[in-house]
Amino acid sequence: MKLQYNPRQRWLIGSVLLTTLYLPTAVAEVKLNGFASIRGTSVSSDGGLAPYPGYEEGELSFKTESLFAIQASADLSEGLSATVQLFGEGANDFEVDARWAYFSYQLNDTHRLSAGRFANPIFHQSEYEKVGYAHNFSRLPKAVYIGLDFSTIEGIAVDSQFNIGDYSLQTKVLYGGWSGEVFSAVTNNTVSFGLDNIMSANATLAGDWWQLFGGIFAAEIDGAVIDSTTVFPLAAGGIALATANGATAAQVADFRNRIGWNEKDAFYWFSGFAVDYSNWLVDFEYVSYEVKESTDVLNNSWYLALGHRFDNVVVTVHTEDYAQDPDFGYLNGVTHPVLQATGRGITSAFGQREFDGVGLSVRYDFHPSAAFKADYFKGTDTRATVDDYQLISFGVDLVF
């Protein structure tokens, strides 16, 4: 296995590792824990293309959804701690990534400050999305938890917990940045991408048997590469035709600025609820996100799950929907008809992928730290290369 890191992470990861591993035992108590999933997954589609990146159509694979993580946490006393998590998943050939590497300081009984590399709470369950044991699905519903690549960021965060009568309120605010690669459904390939000045806030209000939650996430796009490799090449033919039909250099420059992603604002928000009452379980989450004033399309997605607990078995049925809503308002002011049509065509291309479906999941807790799960999902994708599809999976999620 190979440890992956970039220069931006070297100092951070090295510092946390040194702190965690080499402090005298009289000063720091080091705890090791982790989680794993060993799962077989079979995917088939009428169009012949797997519906999600990393999945192999037509084969049973014990690699795609299997993963392993080990975490070292050092209690440095007086409220200070350090954490490193090493993570590898089959979809990336089990190459090990230092997924988390951060320091935390307990400011008081209410607030904790963290700095370093940690989970990005894009949506409600994003922080433990990879921990299969933490939920009742084989995989969290893809319509919401589609596998956004910026699931970890480098930055600073404050976690707070308040008691309000019989209720508890948990909040988190953070600031940071991220750079890496993202998957593009337009090209079916990954492309370099970045998020600068990330600002995020979320809250969860909980009673004895219910939770209400919501959050927002905003950032500035570092999208020069996606512009040069995806957006502008898609527009090249239309720009050439428009120029041949009288479009001025100023009109073309304005058009390129409108369709590009670089330095545009991304905005995400989510809300939902969870109920665990008399062995009945209900979960609902709605999310919406887009890169504003660009060729990106507004994503509006949700899932609803109903489950029942039978002693150490949980049966869950759910439905989910991943929808895109093209908005051509960013083209207001583009007067040349060819440029207008080109922009609309690119936006439609970015919005071509929609899917929905229903699933059945069974969880059996055969051990205090392990659960066997089996799952069947049937869906429909608007892309002709996918069309109707189904996933069947089975395996074990565990924590240690």
Image: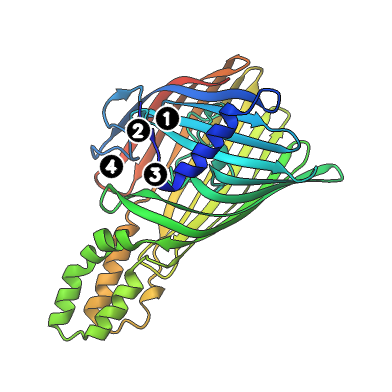
Q: Is residue 375 visible?
A: yes
Q: Which residue is mark 3?
A: 6
Picture quadrant of residue 52: top left
Picture quadrant of residue 97: top left
Q: Which residue is mark 2?
A: 92
Q: Is residue 125 left or right of residue 392?
A: right
Which amino acid type corresponds to the residue marked 3 in the rendered image? Asn
Number of residues whose C-alpha sits closer than 10 Å to that of mark 3, classed few (under 14), some (14–19) or many (20 or more)? few
Which amino acid type corresponds to the residue marked 1 in the rendered image? Gly
Instruction: Tell me the number on the disc at residue 367.
Output: none
Residue 260 percent location from the top left of the image: 33, 68
How far apart marks 1 and 2 lie (CA) works out to 7 Å
| Residue at the outermost left position | 244
Q: Nearer the viewer, residue 210 or 196?
A: 196
How far apart marks 2 and 4 lie (CA) works out to 22 Å
Q: Identify which residue is drawn at 27% across, 85% down.
A: 250
- Of the residues under marks 2 and 4, which one precedes in the sequence? 2
Whether residues under marks 2 and 4 lie with C-beta atoms below 8 angstroms apart, the answer is no
Q: Which residue is mark 1?
A: 88
Residue 197 in the image: above or below residue 131? below
Which quadrant holds the N terminus?
top left
Whether residues under marks 4 and 3 lie with C-beta atoms below 8 angstroms apart, the answer is no
Q: Nearer the viewer, residue 213 or 250?
A: 250
Q: Which residue is mark 4?
A: 386
Number of residues whose C-alpha sits closer than 10 Å to that of mark 2, classed few (under 14), some (14–19) or many (20 or more)? few
Whether residues under marks 2 and 3 lie with C-beta atoms below 8 angstroms apart, the answer is no
Label 4 element class: loop
Which amino acid type corresponds to the residue marked 4 in the rendered image? Val
Whether residues under marks 1 and 2 lie with C-beta atoms below 8 angstroms apart, the answer is yes
Which amino acid type corresponds to the residue marked 2 in the rendered image? Asn
Number of residues whose C-alpha sits closer than 10 Å to that of mark 1, classed few (under 14), some (14–19) or many (20 or more)? many
